[in-house]
Image (spheres, rainbow, N blue to C red):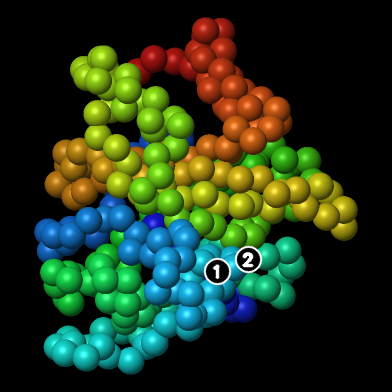
Amino acid sequence: MGWFWASKSQEEFPKTTTTTSSWGASACPIDHTKLATSSACPIKGQSNADDDIEVLNPLNNMPMAISSEMAPGQKIKLSTERTISSIPRGETDDQGLWEYPSPQQMLNAMLKKGKGDGIPEDAVESMVAVHNFLNEGAWQQILEWENAYTKETKVEPRLKKFTGKPHDLSPKARMYLWLGELFPETFNTIPPFDRHDWTVLRSMGRGKGWEEVRYVIDYYGAPDDEETGMPAFVLDTRPALDNFGNARDRFTHWAYPMWKKAMGEVRED
């Protein structure tokens, strides 16, 4: 997940995401029956030897340009339209919003990375839709974390850059897997299918610059929605434990709802 290109357009991305807390499951509107491959983002967070001859964008470790032409041997013509996200890019409004790849660009990128074998061409558009859906959900959860700071400064956060780490378990994910081995009835025993680190710009006040805050996002599969039968996902989004402020925010985020419940401010259904 978390795969963007830069865009200067200000077009809104449709609000199709519903999220709850950092562990809230988001039912996906896309039919996954044709997606037989791994859900992990096809782009690695770091370049490999093959990328050394390319110019990579330092904001996302992606090649500066991915072709929109049909791949050799491709049978189905895919859309080259790219969707504009709702996520502000860079430090100023004139840098616009992050832009998602088109289905054709995603297929070309996967083929370039050797991850396109066995992927049905007619499933790529659904994969892109799922990808975009999850990124919008992750950003909404970041906005919830940043809400107190946004109220104080009256300036919305922005996304500076991101890095995909699909093969690197976060300390929290590793801890839950360890607990799952000991208490499989209580804790998760399946690792996240993807991880991303997003560098978010938090305003220090209008005209006073930005503070960089690293967020870690673990992407988990969840049981299918009981009513619709559609696949669901759980996004565990939180500030990285890089400093005392982030640790305090995580503790407050966890402890405050428990305090309200203990004080009788939250009614049991």
Label placed on residue 220: none
Of label 1 and label 2, which has the lower sequence position?
2
Whether residue 154 is visible: no
Residue occupying the point 38% across, 65% down: 43
Residue occupying the point 55% across, 69% down: 98
Q: Where is the C terminus found, in terms of image quarters?
A: top left
The image shows residue 90 at horizontal and vertical percentages of: 68, 65
Whether residue 46 is visible: yes
Give the residue type that dot 2 points to. Answer: Arg
The image shows residue 187 at horizontal and vertical percentages of: 29, 22
Is 258 positioned to the left or the right of 81 in the image? right
Label placed on residue 89: 2
- Residue placed furthest toward the right: 208
The image shows residue 126 at horizontal and vertical percentages of: 25, 67
Report helix, strand or loop for mark 1. Answer: strand
- Residue placed furthest toward the front: 49
Is 43 positioned to the left or the right of 197 in the image? left
Give the residue type that dot 1 points to. Answer: Trp
Report helix, strand or loop for mark 2. Answer: loop
Residue occupying the point 56% across, 18% down: 255
Q: Which residue is mark 1?
A: 98
The image shows residue 96 at horizontal and vertical percentages of: 64, 73
Q: Residue 1 is drawn in which quadrant?
A: bottom left
Neighbours of disc 1 within 10 Å: few (<14), some (14-19), many (20+): many
Q: CA distance from mark 1 to mark 2?
A: 6 Å
Whether 101 is drawn above or below 206: the answer is below
Name the residue nearer the viewer: 118 or 92. 118
